[in-house]
Amino acid sequence: DRRYSKDTPNTMIVTSNMEPDKWVTFFNDEPALKCAMDRFFDKALLISMKGRSYRGKYRRKIEVTAGVEPRQSAEQTNY
């Protein structure tokens, strides 16, 4: 197949926060998605990472109550 006999690397990185079997809920053309996934996973190296998310680790939260000065806090997210 021509795709695999190129002289230069043909690398593609796809990231998602959900398993590939759930992707169909976000794509309205299931046959096209299956065709694309077939090509993505043909000679793929899959890396699955588990654990807490780093997103939101340094998120600031501001609480406001009518008639009271705003209060800030550094909130640490526990996913």
Image (tube, grey):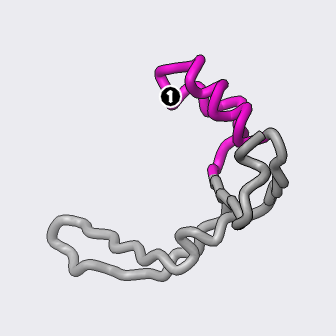
User: Number of numbered discs present?
Assistant: 1
Q: Is residue 25 left or right of residue 9?
A: left
User: Going 69% across and 59% down the picture, which residue do you hit?
Assistant: 10
For mark 1, does the 10 Å Cα neighbourhood hold few (<14), some (14 to 19), or many (20 or more) residues? few
Q: Position of residue 26 (x, y in %)?
A: 51, 31
Check disc 1 and report the residue beneath it.
Answer: 27
Magenta-drawn stretch, dominant element (helix, strand or loop): helix
User: Going 72% across and 44% down the picture, which residue do you hit?
Assistant: 2
Q: Is residue 24 magenta?
A: yes
Q: What element carries label 1?
A: loop
Kindly give the residue lying farthest to the left in the view shown: 67
* Amino acid type assigned to the residue bearing label 1 in the image: Phe
| In the foreground, 36 or 55 | 36
Q: In this view, does 7 lie to the left or right of 47?
A: left
User: Going 50% across and 20% down the picture, which residue do you hit?
Assistant: 29
Magenta-colored span: 16-41
The image quarter in which residue 64 lies: bottom left
Q: In which quarter of the image is the N terminus?
A: top right
